[in-house]
Image: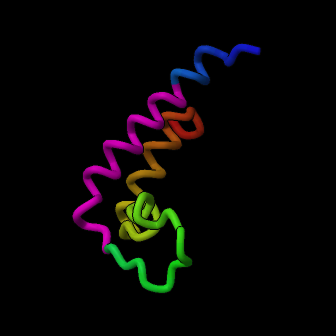
Amino acid sequence: MSMDPERRRRLVALGDWHREWADKQDTAAAFDPSGRPPGSDYNQHHVDVDATGPAQDEYHTKARKIMGIDS
């Protein structure tokens, strides 16, 4: 089964935006692995977890536009 081309385009754009945003936030988001279970993938996703509220708002605002939820 093939994916709708528009949906695929949006998902690729969303992935590109996430990489751009995470790279930008990497030095601003605190890295604190204490209390994480052994083997956790926190080190790979800490920016998603620890980004500031305004940074998360920025990500979600643009993500919603990319996915066509907000204009």
| Callout count | 0
| Horizontal relation, residue 8 to residue 43: left or right | right
State whether residue 60 is above or below residue 2.
Answer: below
Closest to the observer, 23 or 13: 23
Q: Which residues are magenta?
A: 10-30
State whether residue 14 is above or below residue 55.
Answer: above
The verdict on residue 28 being magenta is yes
Q: Quadrant of residue 25?
A: bottom left
| Horizontal relation, residue 51 to residue 4: left or right | left
Q: Position of residue 67 (x, y in %)?
A: 55, 34
Please state, as top left, top right, bottom left or bottom right, where the N terminus lies in the image: top right
The overriding secondary structure of the stretch rendered in magenta is helix
> Which residue is most to the bottom?
35
Please give the name of the residue rendered at 48% of the width and 28% of the height, measured from the top-left corner: 12
Q: Position of residue 14 (x, y in %)?
A: 47, 36
The verdict on residue 25 being magenta is yes
Q: Position of residue 54 (x, y in %)?
A: 36, 65
Please give the name of the residue rendered at 31% of the width and 68% of the height, measured from the top-left corner: 29
> Which residue is most to the front?
39
State whether residue 36 is above or below residue 23.
Answer: below
Q: Quadrant of residue 19?
A: top left
Please give the name of the residue rendered at 53% of the width and 75% of the height, measured from the top-left corner: 38
Please give the name of the residue rendered at 31% of the width and 74% of the height, measured from the top-left corner: 30
